[in-house]
Image (spheres, grey):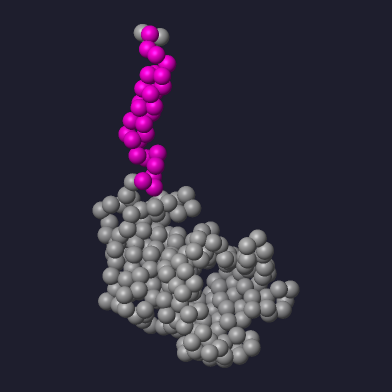
């Protein structure tokens, strides 16, 4: 019977059957279907907090990360065999993309410090000294943003679910947070275990994204640390950091942030 049907008609018929089968199997396209449609943005955040480490992760006093990094300029690469960040957190956050707390970032090559940037809560410093305050603002606005996640359920903040997406091949739930001053930050959470896979926000340098992967923990500490962080501006990768160790709730002398 099929032998009597023209070949062109058979081809069209086969395509229609294949298309119908694909539509009937949404599981083949996990990024196309809403994950956990019954969960609100607030509930997703609450689950993400539990996955990340609960109260210990949500309100740390400080975080010290150690690893190495690669920085890119087109196809040129700069490798730092030692890269560290010390972060002392503020108690609250009204604007997600403004500098708060204290920060020190330093990179080494072959045992020599090659890059240093610090913020003491008011002023920014490099190895050459204090920077003009106007330079501080734009620079930190281009880097601060992830901390919004820890304040997303605070009073005055707003949460909104966005269409789900795929992050590095993983089905992810997207949530947009709006801080009390109106700034927005977008996060992606893994659909299977609520790990934080992505953050994106607008900056003076353009649209900034970070992608998180290769998570690890340490014995007796409730803290899920991404071992690899890739940073992008306007879709172009600028650098990636591999974190190999973390220390939490240490105490640091003020001089650390005023080099």
Residue 78 lies in quadrant = bottom right
Membership of 140 in magenta stretch: no
Asked if one can make out residue 113 in the rendered structure from this viewpoint, the answer is yes
Q: Is residue 13 highlighted in magenta? A: yes
> Given the current orientation, which residue lies at the most extreme right position?
110
Height in image: 127 above or below 202? below
Q: Report the side of 202 relative to 257 (left or right).
A: left
Examine the image and state in which quarter residue 94 appears.
bottom left
128 or 250: nearer the viewer = 128
Q: Which image quadrant: the C terminus? A: bottom right
Q: Is residue 219 visible?
A: no
The stretch in magenta equals: 4-32
In the rendering, at what x and y percent does residue 227 appear?
Answer: 55, 63
Q: Point out residue 65 in the picture as x, y percentages from the top left corner.
A: 56, 73
Closest to the observer: 23 or 36?
Answer: 23
Locate the N terminus by quadrant: top left
Provide residue 214's location: percent of width, then percent of height: 53, 58
User: Residue at coordinates 38% horizontally, 72% vertically from top-left?
Assistant: 148
Residue at 74% across / 73% down in the picture? 110
- Taking the image as shown, residue 63 lies to the left or right of residue 94, namely right
Main secondary-structure element of the magenta-colored stretch: helix
- In this picture, residue 39 sits left or right of residue 54: left
* 122 up-or-down from 67: above or below: below
Q: Position of residue 14 (x, y in %)?
A: 39, 23
Q: Nearer the viewer, residue 105 or 46?
A: 105
Question: Which residue appears at 47% of the width and 83% of the height?
Answer: 137
């Amino acid at each position: 019977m099929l032998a009597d049907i023209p070949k062109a008609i058979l081809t069209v018929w086969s395509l229609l059957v294949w298309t119908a089968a694909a539509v009937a199997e949404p599981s083949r396209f996990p990024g196309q279907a809403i994950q956990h449609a019954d969960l609100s943005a607030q509930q997703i955040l609450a689950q993400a907090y539990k996955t990340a480490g609960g109260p210990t992760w949500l309100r740390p006093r400080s975080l010290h990360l150690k690893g190495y990094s690669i920085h890119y300029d087109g196809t040129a690469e700069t490798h730092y065999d030692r890269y560290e960040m010390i972060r002392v957190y503020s108690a609250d956050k009204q604007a997600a993309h403004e500098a708060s707390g204290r920060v020190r970032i330093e990179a080494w090559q072959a045992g020599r410090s090659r890059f240093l940037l610090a913020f003491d809560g008011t002023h920014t410093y490099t190895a050459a000294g204090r920077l003009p305050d106007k330079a501080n603002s734009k620079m930190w606005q281009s880097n601060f943003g992830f901390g919004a996640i820890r304040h997303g359920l605070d009073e005055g903040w707003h949460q909104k679910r966005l269409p789900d997406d795929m992050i590095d091949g993983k089905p992810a739930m997207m949530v947009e947070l709006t801080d009390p001053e109106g700034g927005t930050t977008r996060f992606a959470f893994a659909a299977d275990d609520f790990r934080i896979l992505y953050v994106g926000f607008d900056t003076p340098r353009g649209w900034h994204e970070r992608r998180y992967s290769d998570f690890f923990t340490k014995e007796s500490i409730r803290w899920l640390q991404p071992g690899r962080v890739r940073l992008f501006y306007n879709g172009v990768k600028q650098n990636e950091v591999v974190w190999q160790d973390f220390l939490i709730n240490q105490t640091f002398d003020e001089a650390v942030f005023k080099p």
